[in-house]
Image: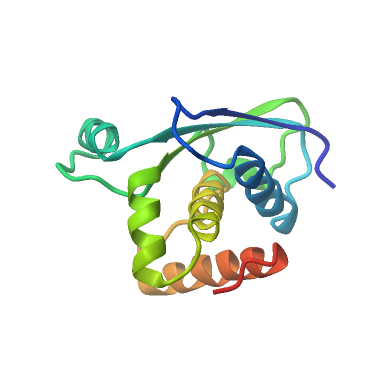
Amino acid sequence: MIQLVDIDIQTQGLEIDTCLVKSAILATLRHCGADFPGEVSVLAVQDAEMSRYNQQYRGKDATTDVLSFPQYFKEEIANAPTEYVCLGDIIINISAARRQAEEYGHSIQREIAFLAVHGALHLLGFDHHDEAAEARMFAVQEEILTEMGLER
């Protein structure tokens, strides 16, 4: 049972359903059994700003759909903290979410929830550095989205 999660969302005037983002992050934490008080910060941006972040933090001169900045390594999360913890930051690219929703033929809400879940899983130590890890992470993402009623 999640004790308390503060989710700070900075939309910068962009149209984003903050309740949906919060629900997606809480669903991810609940699904993964995170049981500690904590905080997650979310920033909504467009392509140009995401490109700057991607260049600055990953050395990639391109935009991307979501970036996550976990504050803990997976091993540290496994020893669930008992005090209030800042899990990390998620940046969601609204421009990419719109494009991907159209490309995949589903709603913008589903795509934004997908990106929020994906980012939250990274904060909890999930990664997709190889095919097996990617398959596991994407399976968990789909489980969470299905629990939220956001199937493809």
Q: What residue is drawn where x is 50% and y is 52%?
A: 112
Q: What residue is drawn where x is 50% and y is 54%?
A: 118
Q: Nearer the viewer, residue 130 or 50?
A: 50
Q: Nearer the viewer, residue 23 or 126?
A: 23
Image coordinates for residue 104, horizontal then vertical, percent: 39, 71
Q: Work out whether 40 lies above or below 63.
A: above
- The total number of labels drawn is 0
The image quadrant where one finds the C terminus is: bottom right
116 with respect to 84 (left or right) = left
Please tell me in which quadrant of the rendered image residue 39 appears: top right
Please tell me in which quadrant of the rendered image residue 31 appears: bottom right
Q: Work out whether 145 lies above or below 58.
A: below
Q: What residue is drawn where x is 53% and y is 50%?
A: 125
Image coordinates for residue 20, horizontal then vertical, percent: 63, 47
Q: Nearer the viewer, residue 37 or 45?
A: 45
61 with respect to 52 (left or right) = left
Rendered image coloring scheme: rainbow
